[in-house]
Amino acid sequence: MLRQMVFILIFMQAIAFQPRSVIRKSNIRLHRNFNRCNTAESGVNGEGIGPLSIEIQQDEIESSDSIASINPLTIGLPIMGILGYKIAPGPLDALTADVWHAMYNNPVVQNPLFEASVASGSFVAWIVMWSSMHLILGEDNTPKWRLDKRQPVEPFLWVKKENWFMWFNPLFSYMGSIYLYHLIHPHPPLEVVPPTFGHLSAEVVFGVILYDLLFYPIHFALHNAPAKWFRKQHVVHHRWSKSLNAVETVQHSYIDGFLQVVVNIIVQQISPFGGPKHPLSRIIHNIVVTYLLTESHSGYDLPWMTHYLLPNIFGGAPRHEKHHAGGGRYLQQYFMYLDDAFGTGEPSGVVVLGKGEGVLVASAVNSTALG
């Protein structure tokens, strides 16, 4: 038990120690040949536009040996928590056991759709919370705590009668899919024995890390796959451009949402201790991941959010706001280490060439045609 918890802690700290970058300037010359076009389009005596050469200043990212600043709480609190639990595990283990016994004896919890209902209910609760945040902060204070420094644009758009599909479609498609899944794969009986607090904590943290890891390549493919039809599955999620609001968390095409659900189902079957994950861990996992996803789409920059509490680990709302603004960058859902390691973070420059369906985005780390 302690070994797995320490391993997860070490992994989290490895995520936190990301090398900073030094920026040097370099010239990158981009060329693009434009096809012939008619006189009205080109305005160049009926001749098509010839080879176009553009020279721009581009940032070249070079890794340095310096280490990112680390919040002492990032290291101190987990170590203190693990040591405290190791010395006196009794109170937290007893509390965990009481919670699980109470839940296990509730017939509602025995329903095969209970875990999916917790996920759906959590999404609703977090979306309502973030949609209402401007009412809590007040009109004068809200822009100060928004990433775009403006009032949110129609945060309750999804409540309007004509926009019923914004909440009905994701709710119905998710719950319906889980119902069909359980027809094929019956929900196993709940485990009677409660987990220890350490077991529970390790499984939840491991599940969040694993979900983020497994969905990263899928998210990358949704932005970069050669197949245009596949990239279009993610367009629904990026169609809202006025201002990022919490309800956009669940605005997906069916295929896009299906892929996320499949990843979560896989993650919910895996425990760092081997064997199936405890039901209580799965329930808490659904509450945690729905919060993290909704927070990242909230558009807020409040001091108690994850990117402030664990600034070297969570990218949080600021990175995801940039993702929605720039598309192909910051593809990691929660953390930062994959974007930083594979160069899908802050691009060194963006160049848009031509017009029409294709947009050429060029940077020092990535060049992608987005349809």
Image (spheres, rainbow, N blue to C red):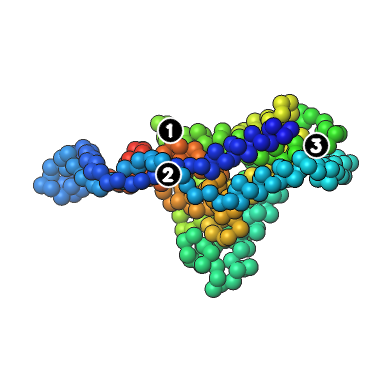
Query: Mark 2 and mark 1: span between their CA atoms?
Result: 34 Å
Question: Mark 3 or mark 2, which has the lower sequence index?
Answer: 2
Question: Mark 2 or mark 1, which has the lower sequence index?
Answer: 2
Q: Residue at x 46, y 58 (%)?
A: 242
Q: Residue at x 71, y 49 (%)?
A: 121
x, y percent for residue 81: 71, 46
Query: Mark 3 and mark 1: span between their CA atoms?
Result: 42 Å
Q: Which residue is mark 1?
A: 225
x, y percent for residue 53: 18, 42
Q: Quadrant of residue 138?
A: bottom right
x, y percent for residue 157: 57, 59
The kind of residue tagged 1 is Ala
Image quarter in which the N terminus is found? top right
Q: Which residue is mark 3?
A: 195
Q: Residue at x 86, y 34 (%)?
A: 192
x, y percent for residue 364: 33, 40
Q: Secondary structure at mark 2?
A: strand
Tell which tag, 3 or 2, sits nearer the viewer.
2
Image quarter in which the C terminus is found? top left
Query: Mark 3 and mark 2: span between their CA atoms?
Result: 41 Å
Tell which tag, 3 or 1, sits nearer the viewer.
3
Question: Mark 3 or mark 1, which has the lower sequence index?
Answer: 3
Q: Secondary structure at mark 3?
A: loop
Tell which tag, 2 or 1, sits nearer the viewer.
2
Determine contact: label 3, label 1, CB under 8 Å: no
Relative placement, left or right, of 217 versus 62 is right
Q: Which residue is mark 2?
A: 66
Task: Note whether residue 94 is visible.
Answer: yes
Residue lying furthest right: 105
Residue lying furthest bottom: 140
| Residue 287, numbered label | none
